Amino acid sequence: MHVPESVLIVGASAAGLSTAEALLRNGYQGSITILGAEPELPYDRPPLSKQILAGAWEPEKAQLRPTTQLVAMPMDLVLGETAVALDPVNHIVHAESGLSVQADAVVIATGVRARTLPGVDALAGVHVLRTLEDAVALRADLLRATRLVVVGEGVLGSEIAATARTMGLDVTVVGPLLAPMAGQLGPVIAPLLGDLHTERGVRLRLGTGVSGFIHDGARVGGVRLDTGEELPADVVVVAVGAVPATDWLTDSGLTLDNGVVCDSYCRAAQGVYAAGDVARWHDDHVGGMVRMENRTNATEQAATVAANLLGAEQPYTPVPYFWTDQFDTKIQVHGTLPTGADVEIVDGSTDGRRFVARYTLDGRVTGVVGWNMPKQTRLRRQEIIDARSVATSRH
């Protein structure tokens, strides 16, 4: 394979920066350009709902690398330029400002945008949390507020609720599932997270959706549930998932279906790759299409894309991993937690709030969840890898 003399990375994200760093680590001598829509230097997203929102960190501390290090890297970092179109044959990206950038290869790392609800944009006091700007604006609003309603019981909604409660706000979480992170952890472990939130004073109004917002003039005053119940609020956060940022690729000819559709090498077209939250690729281990929204995937997939740009032809088959910090609890998830899996506590105990749970489906270990047991959780990850290698050898 011909190694491209120039690489254009669209998205100054964790995946975008990691791709550039992996190329350089592997001795790439060509030119690298990163095109980023936001004006900020590349920053990390996990701290936004925790350290930045709580005020424990200044916004600059979320930067992925110190400014001096970024400036010293042999690449062009072009910020505040929103990509609006891609010519995948000639590898040209057009930006909103009129700027056009051409390269031998393009890496799409534009991530996702927050999903919203009807009527959100028209009301002050209703927030989503995706960008650093979002986090700063939400924090400013929370400092003036006493009552917060979080719409969405997933990872992000649960983290925001925990942070806001720690800040002293009256917090209510609403969502269709019956426990915080039930969609991620399943029916055995998620209720324990519900207990933790309840003990810390978070009100859970779960198992119901939102039918609309209450407002007096231009500012939100609360949330109306499908049950008819009204929850007063000074601030509302909508955390109902995210949508791959692919609008700019609509006319590109690339296959777009819940992300940029790629082969097992993360390749969307000749000389066009995707990495991070926006990429949906064929995972040869799973035997189907996969898209992941987690921080570890951004780095690992970027490393594979960089290797493949340099001629490796390496399929991407990760063991998924994500973590969440809520109150004084760290939850770590390795592998997958399929619906219907058998769940067994294999280290510690749920009573002591320190344990590892193993998820097994059809006699095969698919995932582990650690609750304040990082070392043991990491060791148990090996069981997933072992189960995978047994399954592979059978085939």
Image (cartoon, rainbow, N blue to C red):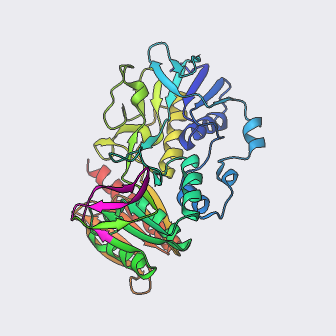
Q: Could you tell me residue 1's position as x and y percent?
A: 50, 21
Of 190 and 165, the residue lying toward us: 165
Is residue 102 visible in the rendered image? The answer is no
Magenta-colored segment: predominant secondary structure: strand
Looking at the image, residue 243 lies above or below residue 93: below
Q: Could you tell me residue 21's position as x and y percent?
A: 64, 38
Write down the quadrant of residue 13 in the picture.
Answer: top right
Is 324 left or right of 175, judged from the image as shown?
A: right
Is 66 left or right of 336, judged from the image as shown?
A: right
Is 47 left or right of 60, judged from the image as shown?
A: left
Residue 217 among those drawn in magenta:
yes
Of 38 and 174, the residue lying toward us: 174
Residue sticking out furthest to the bottom: 351
Is 132 left or right of 27, judged from the image as shown?
A: left
Write down the quadrant of residue 228 in the picture.
Answer: bottom left
**Magenta stretch in the rendered image:** 205-227
